[in-house]
Image (cartoon, grey):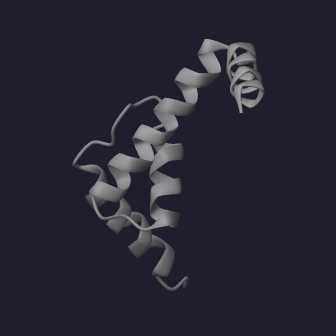
Amino acid sequence: MEVMEENMLQCLDDVPLLQIQRYANCVAQFISAYQLGLSGAEAVWASKKYHGHYTLPPTMLAEVDRAQLMMAAPLE
């Protein structure tokens, strides 16, 4: 068991800090999206649109609704 723990710590030491920070930012965005009540697909869309933000702005829900309406509107 100790060998496995040592291997895990060595592997974590090999991961660059910037990569860990970017992953944490991505996870924070998804948590924010789910707390706002978005579905998985909506959370992905919002995460791509607001890729530089730690959390999603409250006004983003209206943008999701507008985007869904535009996609559902029949083309003439």
Residue under the image location 55 percent in, 82 percent down: 75
Q: From what the image shows, is residue 67 above or below residue 23? A: below
Which residue: 49% across, 65% down?
40
Identity of the residue furthest to the front in this view: 1
Quadrant housing the N terminus: top right
Closer to us: 51 or 9: 9
In this orientation, which residue lies closer to the viewer: 55 or 63? 55
> Residue 38, located in which quarter of the rendered image?
bottom left
Q: Is residue 26 above or below residue 20?
A: below
Is 62 located above or below residue 46 in the figure? below
Residue 58 in the image, given as x and y percentages of width and height: 22, 48
Q: Residue furthest left?
A: 58
Judge from the rendering whether residue 58 lies leftward or rightward of residue 38; answer left or right.
left
Task: Provide residue 31's location: percent of width, then percent of height.
Answer: 38, 48
Q: Left or right: where does residue 40 sit relative to residue 17?
A: left
For the C terminus, the image quarter is bottom right
- Quarter-of-image position of residue 4: top right
| Residue 63, x across and y down, in percent | 33, 57
Q: Residue at x 30, y 51 (%)?
A: 60
Q: Which residue is drawn at the image coordinates 47% and 31% (left, top)?
A: 25
Q: Nearer the viewer, residue 53 or 73?
A: 53
Residue nearer the viewer, 16 or 66: 16
Image label count: 0
Q: Where residue 74 sits in the image (x, y, percent)?
A: 51, 86
User: In the visual, does 63 lie left or right of 50?
Assistant: left
